Image (cartoon, rainbow, N blue to C red):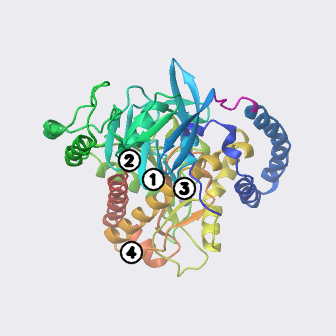
Amino acid sequence: MGIKIMPNWRRTSLCNFDSSGEEFTHLFFVFALTRGVHRRKFITMLKRRTLSIMLIFCAALFALEFDGSFEVVTPSGSLNFGFVERGGARFTTTDEIAKYSDNRFYSAIKRKETLSIGGESYTFSPDNQFVTVAGRTYEMPIATIVTGNALLVPLESFIEIMADRARMAVDFSGGKAVFTSEGEVQRPAIQPQPTQAHEELAVPAAPVAEKKPPEADVQQDKPSEVVADTPAPPRKTKWFIMIDPGHGGKDPGASAKDGTREKTLVLDIAKKVAEAFKGDERFEVQLTRDDDTFIPLQKRTEMANSRNADIFVSIHCNAARNKDARGTQVFFLAPARSDHARATAALENSAIFLEEPTDSMDVLDFIMADVIQNEFLRESSRLAVLVEESIARDAGIPARGPAGAGFYVLNGCFMPAILVEAAFLSNVEDARLLAQESFRQRIADGIADGLREFIRELPE
Ligand SMILES: [Zn+2]
């Protein structure tokens, strides 16, 4: 089953459940994770789902209703876009545009939706006047609007941009848009935004009534080829990272033979990660705990969400029955594909049994949360790859390969989220290394370097 990245303006919508196959995968995944009292809650939850289905039905009744359909006649055929009217302007939706797109990608962290149309990528942002096409930025006279499940895109502006990309003129006079190569109609009013340095090369939009012979139109196209690519504003410059040292207080986590505890080691590593970002203006780092306190798993996630963190990193040390198992491994939230990954998640999830009854996560919340983190699957798994490679490189220990597993603490994060198992306390060699402050420093540097790399390679 393919990974579906849902735009996060759908986040609050019940339409997250629009793919029943995917939903059932989640249900079985959660069912496999639940035990005893949790399983009873799961049954209760199934009853509550009946209510959810009714709510979904009601939501469908209030789905976006179009005020009409607008035809665009292009040399390769007619396109039809449903539109709504808002404040005297017509808007279509990215869902409508997607009818003519062979590829659609949503970057949750950037809140940008990219659709491939005619072999070129169009990137839209919510409440934003700028559209980037194949690296060039167009400014529309009005901004996009987020409404319910949909991102509304100004219809005429979008059509003008398409025409400009096709190097054609567009005629709106007949109640529809007709693309034409004749020079009798005005060139699209919307042109790519030039940079300051190339301003003199920019061609102003032709006046409405001006007529040009066809060859002049061809001439007019040439200078815009030289216009430099412009990055899409506004650009994110500050990143908030929530670092979560695992366990704490009455929950010691795993223990080494000599009694060294996971909760103590991971707190030290977490503090060193925060230290590694000191003085770097681009990052703000906060720890979920900076002393030996017990924090319920769900509370850790809530802290990251309430601070609007861009990235969540939970830090742990592993333990296994097989004393030979060693090395570093980074996990993200996804159904486990190996017994080892499943065992690691079970170990880290066991903290939930130390929580007060009121602390434990409602199972319905767990499912909703799981669906939410699924939105970030692509980014979380990439983050896991970069951080694991970087730890292995900086600390000089074997990398076990990033993996998915069902960690409670990664659930419900509204952001890319990973869980780092620095090394094995159950392995003599790893435990000896973890006891050294210099090794913990290298682990922390590895985590920080991996995070920087992740930010660096994010698409514009
Ligand atoms: Zn742990």
**Count of numbered circles on the image:** 4
CA gap, disc 3 to disc 4?
26 Å
Seen from the viewer's position, the closer of residues 345 and 100 is: 100
Label 1 sits on what residue type? Answer: Gly
Seen from the viewer's position, the closer of residues 402 and 323 is: 402
Query: Which residues are drawn in magenta?
Result: 61-66
Label 2 sits on what residue type? Answer: Ala
CA gap, disc 1 to disc 3?
28 Å
Local secondary structure at mark 1: loop
Q: Is residue 259 above or below residue 97?
A: below
- In the rendered image, which residue does mark 1 sit on? 118
CA gap, disc 2 to disc 3?
35 Å
Question: Which quarter of the rendered picture does the N terminus lie within?
Answer: bottom right
Q: Furthest residue to the front?
A: 213
In the image, ligand 1 is in what quadrant?
A: bottom right
Confirm or deny contact between disc 1 and disc 2 (CB under 8 A).
yes
CA gap, disc 1 to disc 2?
9 Å
Q: Residues within 10 Å of mark 4 (few under 14, many from 20)?
A: some
- In the rendered image, which residue does mark 3 sit on? 377
Confirm or deny contact between disc 4 and disc 1 (CB under 8 A).
no
Residue 302 is covered by the magenta coloring:
no
- In the rendered image, which residue does mark 4 sit on? 397
